[in-house]
């Protein structure tokens, strides 16, 4: 069983290991014929907030190797 992908598309393998989104916690088969929710609700596992330890936004674009708090997946 594969879980739901990110709200826009599949998250790359270069994302931060601390990045979370609700699709990670949905135990359902992913159906490629259904549109993604597009909710863009991401949070940092370290802070449990929508911002990381560096106080910058946590999302699939911003959480990358340029940030000090980034942990490779």
Image (cartoon, helix red, strand yellow):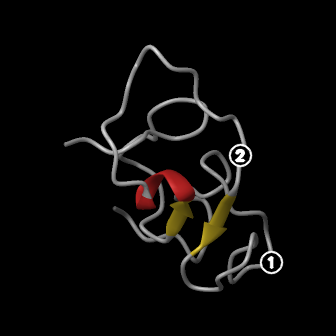
Q: Give the class, few, some or many, for how many residues have Cα within 10 Å of label 2's Cα (few <14, many ≥20).
A: few
The secondary structure type at the circle numbered 2 is loop
Q: How far apart are the alpha carbons under marks 1 and 2?
A: 18 Å
- Rendered location of residue 10, percent (x, y): 44, 34
Q: Quadrant of residue 42?
A: bottom right
All told, the count of numbered labels is 2
| In the foreground, 53 or 26 | 26
Query: Residue under circle 2?
Result: 40
Q: Mark on residue 55?
A: 1
- Rendered location of residue 47, percent (x, y): 65, 86
- Rendered location of residue 38, percent (x, y): 69, 35
- The residue shown at (49%, 51%) is 23
Horizontal side of residue 37 vs 26, given as left or right:
right
Horizontal side of residue 44 vs 58, given as left or right:
left
Horizontal side of residue 62 vs 64, given as left or right:
right
| In the foreground, 25 or 62 | 25
């Amino acid at each position: 069983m594969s879980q739901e992908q990110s709200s826009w598309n599949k998250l790359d393998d270069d994302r931060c290991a601390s990045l979370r989104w609700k699709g990670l916690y949905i135990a359902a088969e992913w159906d490629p014929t259904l549109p993604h929710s597009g909710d863009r609700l991401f949070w940092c596992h370290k802070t449990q907030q929508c911002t990381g330890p560096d106080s910058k936004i946590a999302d699939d674009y911003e959480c990358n190797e340029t940030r000090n708090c980034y942990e490779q997946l």
